[in-house]
Amino acid sequence: MTRRWHTPRLFAWLLLAAGLAVFTTLGRWQWGRAQEKEQLLAAYAAAERAPPQALAAVADAALGERLPRVAVRGRYVAERGYLIDEQPRDGRVGVLVLALFEPDGTARKLLVNRGWLPWSHAPGSQPAVPPLPLGEVELQGLYAPPPGGGLRIGGNALERQTRWPKLTLYVDLPQMAADLGATLYPRLLLQDADPASGFVRAWTPAVMPPARHRAYAVQWWSFAVVAVVIFLVLHWRQPAPSESP
């Protein structure tokens, strides 16, 4: 029996158009996210291999997505710092340790991310933070924006704490500047890896791989193709017995 084309109703056309718009838009969005992740990972990889430049040369530059590797001399400020809690790594939970640093020749302070430490959160326990170096030191690392994320509930937790280092779930530079009574640089220093430091310093972001974003994009575009095939099959069919010649 010969198949015939049955003119779709307006609702069917609208449903197909809406589905195609959603599936293709989500596919393009996932493809764009893959490109963003590639650029981000490439920026970190290039920065870690770059020779260091003076912090003063880039501190206030319009850096955009750039992650310059810098060197800076100065002294740590004792008894001032923060623990960024709930930081997972390799199946364990720990903290990122931020210390306050005074670069030479300026009144501004720099927050230095010393790295990650495990912390079991057992009652009465504290992370085993290695002591700060004494005297003048030179630090090298990536000059990077503060990390995003973290639950910002319950107001300013820093104001309610009196012991240092203070515990928080996120990095808020204006909030920390007010807490410290100091002017801070607009970025953090992510210290170079050092096996002898006692810290884990792996700064490449733990993000979804670009390949997975592309797989999701192909999946959404496949849904668009399937929608078109279903639409054609439903409207290119055998006539009902009453329609037979």
Image (spheres, rainbow, N blue to C red):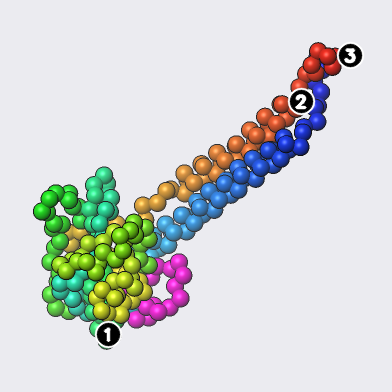
Foreground residue, 2 or 21? 21
Earlier along the polypeptide chain: callout 2 or callout 1? Answer: 1
Position in image of residue 101 (x %, y %): 23, 75
Picture disc at residue 107: 1
Amino acid at the residue labelled 1: Ala
Dot 3, how many residues are within 10 Å of its Cα: few (below 14), some (14-19), or many (20+)?
Answer: few
Position in image of residue 112 (x %, y %): 26, 69
The residue pinned by badge 3 equals: 245
Which residue is found at the position 13% from the left and 57% from the top? 126
In three-dimensional space, the C-alpha distance between marks 2 and 1, rounded to whole angstroms, equals 76 Å
The residue segment tinted magenta is 56-72
Which residue is found at the position 71% from the left and 26% from the top? 233
Does residue 178 lie above or below 43 as drawn? below
Dot 1, how many residues are within 10 Å of its Cα: few (below 14), some (14-19), or many (20+)?
Answer: few
Earlier along the polypeptide chain: callout 3 or callout 1? Answer: 1
Within the image, what quadrant is residue 193 found in?
bottom left
Amino acid at the residue labelled 3: Pro
Amino acid at the residue labelled 2: Trp
In the image, 92: left or right of 146?
Answer: left
Q: Secondary structure at mark 2?
A: strand
Pointer 2 with pointer 3, Cβ within 8 A: no
